[in-house]
Image: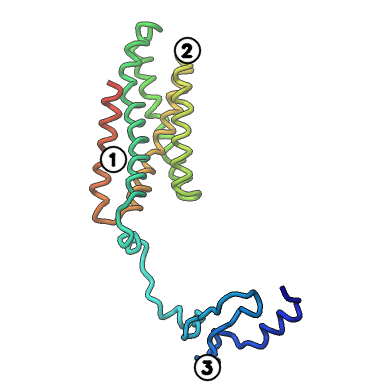
Amino acid sequence: QTSNGTLSSILSSKKSPRSPTSPKNERKVSFAGVAGTATYHVDDEPVQLLTQESLSKLNPISVDEAIFEAGVGRTQYKLLLICGLTFCSDAAEVTFLSYVTEVLRCDWGLTSYEESLITSAVFAGMVLGAPVWGWIADHHGRRRSFILSSMVITIFGFATALSQGFWSLVAMRGMVGIGVSGLPVGFDILAEALPSESRGVFLMYIEYFWTLGSVWVN
């Protein structure tokens, strides 16, 4: 232990180990008098501070080049799984309507017009929701747009099972359609995280999730 005055006097008696004016044989600091530790050797060459001139000599790379250097790894496969599962739910939400309308036609006595209205509600919601999710992705980020659209599908997908009448069912399916229209943002998220030579392969892989969702409904 030492007082502040003693500590400052010890430190002030030593030249900076990284000072360009210090001789090489002095570029060593002994901390034994301060903390009782061994000597600490620093590099012989002084630290070069970044200046505007040195920054101008750097060779920057583009985002695509950085992604190419990073390559394909665990992160890209996680993104494929996440985006693929949402694409799977998209297929399920669209495909199962043909079965639901057949069952409800008998239970609720639906007309052909009402059957088509249930199916059309999803696609009408997609038309209305697509510009909204695109705006959110551009102004607040694709991740937020993707997560919010997935939440909308989840909430109103479960709410569909609680529908007690025709118009409530149409409204719930319309809201699901709004959420479904935001899922293509996942394609952009996945594609932007991949090197150019791997994008085509991964975007083909994600199409298999649509098949998986359709098979699951059947």
**Is 118 on the left or on the right of 10, as rendered?**
left
Q: Residue at x 24, y 55 (%)?
A: 197
Between residue 119 and residue 15, name the one nearer to us: 15
Identify residue for label 2: 165
Q: Is residue 101 above or below residue 139?
A: above
Q: Indicate the secondary structure of the residue bearing disc 2.
A: loop
Query: Left or right: where does residue 20 sit relative to residue 212?
Result: right
Mark 3 or mark 2: whose residue is earlier in sequence: 3
Name the amino acid type tagged 2: Gly
Residue with the mark numbered 3: 23
Who comes first in sequence, dot 1 or dot 2? 2
Of 89 and 135, nearer the camera is 89
Write down the residue under mark 1. Answer: 206
Q: Are marks 1 and 2 in contact (CB under 8 Å)?
A: no
Badge 3 marks a residue whose secondary structure is loop
Which x, y percent locates residue 13? 66, 88
Relative side of 99 to 124, left or right? left
Is residue 29 depicted above or below 106 in this figure? Answer: below
Which residue appears at 75% of the width and 77% of the height? 4
Q: Please, what is the three-letter code of the amino acid marked with disc 1?
A: Ile
